[in-house]
Image (cartoon, rainbow, N blue to C red):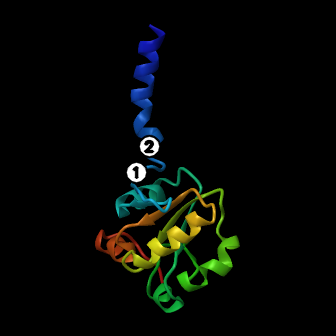
Amino acid sequence: MKRILLTIATLVMMPFMTSACGMGEQTPEGYENVPVEHAMQQWKEGMMPFLFLDVRSQEEYAQGHIAGAMLIPVDELAGRMNEVPKNRQVYVYCHSGKRSARASALLASHGFTRIENIVGGIEAWKQAGYPVEK
């Protein structure tokens, strides 16, 4: 009977346990590629401490970014990794996903374990109709 109850409890809790992270494709470099919808879900729910990391240029950031995003251009990231918290989920994005993949790999290679690269970047975010601020 205990085993049945435990199995039922696990099945009921599974959607809640997987909603925070682990929803994307794990890369060999040690980060996940996640769809923009997953990042938006976390942004709306605010259920766990997370950070959006924008790795575009200052000019691109000024043209529109995700509210509350931290800007560290990818070319500066190696020297500014101490500004990225290791104890939070980090959603990395750029314009379309190439620079953010490079930044995600860099962070993962330096011991960051909660890195998720937003597939399609800010363009996918805007195409989905999600808000940006200037």
Q: Nearer the viewer, residue 41 or 6?
A: 6
Picture mark count: 2
Identify the residue under disc 1: 23
SS of the residue at dot 1? loop
Identity of the residue drawn at 41% across and 66% down: 118
Q: Position of residue 34 (x, y in %)?
A: 39, 60
Rendering quarter of residue 107: bottom right
In the rendered structure, are the residues bearing label 1 and label 2 in contact, judged by CB atoms less than 8 Å apart? yes
Identity of the residue drawn at 51% across and 68% down: 105
Which residue in the rendered view is the most extreme toward the bottom?
59
Q: Quadrant of the N terminus?
A: top left
Identity of the residue drawn at 47% across and 53% down: 45
Amino acid at dot 1: Met
Classed neighbour count for the residue bearing mark 2: other residues with Cα under 10 Å, few (<14), some (14–19), many (≥20): few
Q: Earlier in the sequence, mark 1 or mark 2?
A: 2
Q: Position of residue 31 (x, y in %)?
A: 49, 60
Q: Position of residue 30 (x, y in %)?
A: 50, 59
Classed neighbour count for the residue bearing mark 1: other residues with Cα under 10 Å, few (<14), some (14–19), many (≥20): some
SS of the residue at dot 2? helix
Q: Position of residue 60 (x, y in %)?
A: 46, 88
Separation (CA) of disc 1 from disc 2: 7 Å
Q: Nearer the viewer, residue 68 or 85?
A: 85
Identify the residue under disc 2: 18
Amino acid at dot 2: Thr
Q: Is residue 88 shown left or right of residue 121?
A: right
